[in-house]
Amino acid sequence: MVTPIPDFWMVGVALILGKIAAILLAQKSPLNPKLRLKILISACSFVILYLLAALQIYISAAILLPWFLPSSAFLAYIIPAIRSKKHA
């Protein structure tokens, strides 16, 4: 018997974490390209680690965690925060 976790709970948690990360990135106003790349790689690594943890929890404890919608919601906050802001 597999126990599913509702999507909206995990999406809500991902939105909160993404917003917190975006606010922290906004405080570091001048982001050089190397730092942007490091932040992007670490955010993608976090998503991959979450996917692997969700798969392991599904295999070992029969608890189904959603991964696509929470991951895309998290990245939807992070990616615009690290883009370069060019002012006219």
Image (cartoon, rainbow, N blue to C red):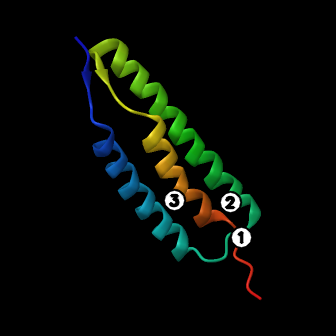
The kind of residue tagged 2 is: Arg
Label 1: element kind: loop
The correct choice, above or below, for 67 with respect to 79 in the image is: above
Q: Name above or below for residue 33 compared with residue 41.
A: below
Give the Cα distance between marks 2 and 3: 14 Å
Disc number lying in front (2 or 1): 1
Task: Identify the residue at image location x=64%, y=51%.
Answer: 40
Q: Secondary structure at mark 2?
A: helix
Categorize mark 3 by other alpha carbons within 10 Å: few (<14), some (14-19), many (20+). Answer: many
Report which residue position mark 3 lands on: 77
Q: Quadrant of the C terminus?
A: bottom right
Rendered residue at 31%/44% (across/down): 8
Distance (Cα) linking label 1 and label 3: 14 Å
85 is higher (above) or lower (below) than 54? below
Name the residue tied to disc 1. Answer: 84
Q: Which callout, 2 or 1, points at the residue further toward the start of the chain?
A: 2
> What residue is at 41 percent from the left and 63 percent from the top?
20
User: 78 or 32, which is in the foreground?
Assistant: 78
Residue type highlighted by circle 3: Tyr
Q: Are marks 2 and 1 in contact (CB under 8 Å)?
A: yes
Does residue 87 sit above or below 44 in this rendering? below
Neighbours of disc 2 within 10 Å: few (<14), some (14-19), many (20+): some
- What amino acid type is highlighted by mark number 1? Ser
The x, y position of residue 27, in whole percent, is 52, 76
In the rendered image, which quarter contains the N terminus?
A: top left
Name the residue tied to disc 2: 36
